[in-house]
Structures are given as C-alpha cells and as structure tokens.
Image: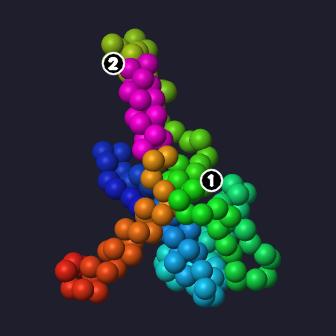
Amino acid sequence: MLSYTNSGGIMKLSTRFSDAIHILAYLKIYQNTKLSSEEIAASVVTSPVVIRRLMSKLKAAGLIKTISGTPAPILTKSTDQITLLDIYMAVEGDTELFSIDRQTNPDCIVGGNIQQVLTQYYDEVQAATQQKLESITLTQVIDNIRNEQALKESGELND
C-alpha cells in the first residue's frame, strides 16, 4: 500500500492495480520459467498470498489460466488484446476513483452544494481515466519495461 499525509492523517492507496499489471507482465516476460506465486511475489516484493489473491481475480476476469498445483499460469489473450482497463476492472471492479464526503452541512452554501458539483467533475475524470486506460495495452507496458532495462544495461539511464 502507498500512503500519503493529508490534513486528516494517513490515507492508504491500493497497489492492487499496479501489482496486477506487474504480475501479467512477469507472466509474459518470464513465460518459459518457473512461475510460482513465490517467484512472482519476489519480484513484486509482497507475499505469495497477495499474489494468489490477485491471480484469482485475474483468472475470474478471464485474463489468465492456472492449473492448481502447477507453477505455470498463462495469459489467455495476447498482450495486445489486454488493456489496462481490463486489468483495472479485474482487480478493482467498477470502483470510483474518488469518493465524496456525504456528511456535509446542508445549511452551508458549500456543504449544501459540494456533492453535486464534485460529482460532475469526478464523473468526467472517471470517464477520461477509463478511456485512457482502455487505450494502453499490456504490450505497450512490456515494451516500455524492456526499453527501460535496455537503457539501464547500456548505461544511458541512471537509477
């Protein structure tokens, strides 16, 4: 989980989405190696239990196929047919990116109107985000991972 400080304390942001992308990229890049949840967890730096839970969601969404007891999960589609929106929907569902505080003072000009105003902005942001996620494929992500690695290996990119 990522966290940041705001005026109310610490808010936790889920890393399920990025971890799921990580898993799928790992399955493709390392498709000819041992793909146990332990091996994948070592790359994500999390527990195998977290990996298995995410893989269960990816399987339920039809993005991967697993055989119980076998460390050989595979993608069910080519990487150019899997979008970031597919992955997001698999692990986060149709959750809203932002939530609105519903407990504001209706007798205040701000408290009485903020929910309606923010709802329209949030809906626009949600639609734009989903549209963008739908335009990015797992192939693009994997290509960029490989490009970053090539730059590191060539010394052109400093960590």
Relative to 49, is 118 above or below? Answer: above
The dominant secondary structure in magenta is helix
Looking at the rendered structure, the secondary structure element under dot 2 is loop
Looking at the rendered structure, the secondary structure element under dot 1 is helix
Relative to 83, is 24 above or below? Answer: below
Q: Which residue is mark 2?
A: 110
Q: Earlier in the sequence, mark 1 or mark 2?
A: 1
Asked if one can make out residue 155 in the rendered structure from this viewpoint, the answer is: yes
Q: Residue at x 21, y 85 (%)?
A: 155
Q: Which residue is mark 1?
A: 90
Q: Residue at x 67, y 72 (%)?
A: 74
Amino acid found under the numbered disc labelled 1: Ala
Asked if one can make out residue 111 in the rendered structure from this viewpoint, the answer is: no
Q: Quadrant of residue 8?
A: top left
Residue 112 on image: x %, y %: 40, 15
Which quadrant, please, contains the C terminus?
bottom left
Q: Front-most of 40 and 63?
A: 63
Q: Residue at x 60, y 88 (%)?
A: 33
Residue 10 on image: x %, y %: 38, 54
Tell me the tag on residue 104.
none
| Residue at far right of view | 68
Q: Residue at x 34, y 79 (%)?
A: 149
Q: Front-most of 101 and 143?
A: 143
Amino acid found under the numbered disc labelled 2: Val
Residue 83 on image: x %, y %: 53, 53
Q: How many marks?
A: 2
Distance of mark 1 from mark 2, alpha carbons?
36 Å
Q: Nearer the viewer, mark 1 or mark 2?
A: 1
Q: Is residue 112 located in the magenta-colored stretch of the structure?
A: no
Q: Is residue 120 located in the magenta-colored stretch of the structure?
A: yes
Relative to 74, is 36 above or below? Answer: below
Q: Which residues are magenta?
A: 116-132
